[in-house]
Image (spheres, rainbow, N blue to C red):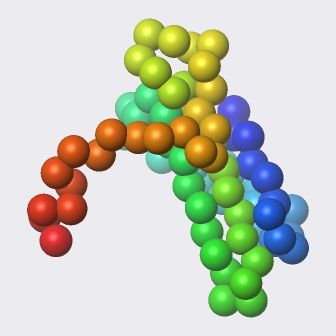
Amino acid sequence: MVAASNVAAVDDGLGARWGRLVDDWRERWSIPGISAAVQVADGSTWTGTSGRAELGSPAVAVKPATPFVIASVTKTF
């Protein structure tokens, strides 16, 4: 389940669609937890999370401020 919050005036319907996308991506790619943020051209923002923060800890949900270890992903760019 996505715990999404509108930080600015993002339309609730749009935020709900983005939340479903985050859930779908997590399930499709078998990701334990994910956090996403979007800033729209008008300055409004949306953040959403899905899944768990730690493997083996289903009770610990991902939050927007949850740190993720990304290793050397940036070397591909």
- Residue 8 in the image: x percent, y percent? 83, 71
- Quadrant location of residue 43? bottom right
User: Horizontal placement of 54 versus 2: left or right?
Assistant: left
**In this rendering, does residue 50 appear at all?**
no
- Residue 63 in the image: x percent, y percent? 64, 38
Residue lying farthest to the bottom in this orientation: 42
User: Horizontal placement of 60 versus 13: left or right?
Assistant: left
User: Horizontal placement of 71 versus 36: left or right?
Assistant: left
**Total number of numbered labels?**
0
- Quarter of the C terminus within the rendering: bottom left
Q: Is residue 32 above or below residue 65?
A: above
Residue at 59%, 61% (x, y): give it.
37
Q: Is residue 52 above or below residue 7?
A: above
- Quarter of the N terminus within the rendering: top right
Residue closest to the eye, 1 or 7: 7
Residue at 74%, 89% (x, y): give it.
42
- Residue 7 in the image: x percent, y percent? 80, 63
Residue lying farthest to the top in this orientation: 56
- Quadrant location of residue 56? top left
- Residue 4 in the image: x percent, y percent? 75, 48
Residue at 61%, 69% (x, y): give it.
38
Residue at 87%, 73% (x, y): give it.
9
**In this rendering, does residue 37 appear at all?**
yes
